[in-house]
Image (cartoon, rainbow, N blue to C red):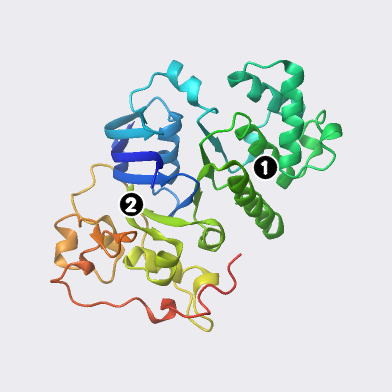
Amino acid sequence: MDNVLELRNLSISFTSPEGTINAVRDVTLDVHKGEVLAVVGESGCGKTVMCQSVMKLLPKNSKIDRGEIILDGTDITNYSERNMRKIRGKDVSMIFQDPMTTLNPTIPIGKQITEAILVHNKISREDAKKRAIELLDLIGIDDPVHRFNLQPHFFSGGMRQRCVLAIALASNPKLLFADEPTTALDVTVQAKILDLLLEVRDKLGLSIVFVSHDLGVVSRIADRVAVMYAGKIVEIGTVDEVFYDPRHPYTWGLMSSHPSLVKRGGELKSIPGMPPVLINPPDCDMFAFRNKYAMKADFEQMPPMFKISDTHYAATWLLDSRAPKVECPVSLRKNDDVMEGCL
């Protein structure tokens, strides 16, 4: 299967007064053409940093320590800002959680979309305006000709997020990062934005990396799911594999704490403790300190990615042939009710 993005052993750190923070640690990940890959995990686990590293939108105190970023077959790991400007928005684009931090409140929506089109396309301003109106229509803005000239404050939160999506799609990118784009929206608008993303994916054939901490949202939109903890991918597989047959204790914890993913009548549980501070982290399973199933090996050595199927992998010593057999919590075992209630 063709990949639009390949991350190979990617590690990213930040300098701080307290020391070096290892925000992303040895991540290897592929994004297939035309798929929606969801990246899930608690706040601070490295999801956004990993995505922004591809866009080269990280702050100055960050550094790629090792690894490769390959976008559509081209290694962009060491690209300069000048080179990134040629592909940012054209080949890879991003939408963020709060549209008002992306949109200029004083400039009409249509002009902002038009400028995004003109950056990478040698066309007249009139043709760019026509394209902007077509994009407004594509993302579901009624009466786009009239609303072309309106500032962002004339739009609702959901409509502003649609406009941000139009800007991101202005130059037909191959890859779109959606960084928790529905978190600030109510459930009804959230569902419409998710449907819109899938519709745009099907029409334009782009790939989407969807970042979220909401497993209910992920179950609605994703083809594959990557679970991230303490800067590492700890489990990855198809949405059915991760939701119906989770293998990593951290994935069990995330699912057990989500109301829509717990078996009806089951107990809603939280993961004990807090995510670790990644300053000089020890070479072990960082989830061991919160894992009631942790063994001696978890505190001594980082587990490798164990293969469960051709598409399903998990990094936990519980999958080692020498480990005692520990089954998924009863409340999460495969049944028809597990997915009931998801968006």
| Residue drawn at x 51%, y 45% as measured from the top left | 208
- Report the front residue among 221 and 158: 221
- Report the front residue among 320 and 282: 320
| Residue drawn at x 71%, y 42% as measured from the top left | 139
- Report the front residue among 263 and 204: 204
Residue 261 as seen in the image, left or right of residue 321: right
**Distance between mark 1 and mark 2 Cα atoms:** 28 Å
SS under mark 2? strand
Residue 206 as seen in the image, left or right of residue 72: right
Asked if residue 114 is positioned above or below residue 278 in the image, the reply reads above
Residue 39 as seen in the image, left or right of residue 180: left
* Three-letter code, disc 1: Gln
* Image quadrant where one finds the C terminus: bottom right
Task: Name the disc covering residue 78, or none.
Answer: none
Q: How many numbered circles does the render carry?
A: 2
| Residue drawn at x 37%, y 78% as measured from the top left | 329
Q: What percent of the width, then of the height, locates residue 84?
A: 45, 22
Residue 106 appearing in the image? no
Residue 110 appearing in the image? yes
- Residue placed under numbered mark 2 in the picture: 233
Asked if residue 190 is positioned above or below residue 151 in the image, the reply reads below
SS under mark 1? helix
Instruction: Find residue 147 and report its image quarter.
Output: top right
Q: Residue furthest bottom?
A: 265
- Residue placed under numbered mark 1 in the picture: 161
Q: Earlier in the sequence, mark 1 or mark 2?
A: 1
Asked if residue 28 is positioned above or below residue 224 in the image, the reply reads above
Q: What percent of the width, then of the height, locates residue 193?
A: 66, 51
Label 2 crowd bin: few (<14), some (14–19), many (20+), radius 10 Å: many
Q: What percent of the width, then of the height, locates residue 341?
A: 60, 72
Asked if residue 101 is positioned above or below residue 223 in the image, the reply reads above
- Report the front residue among 325 and 200: 200
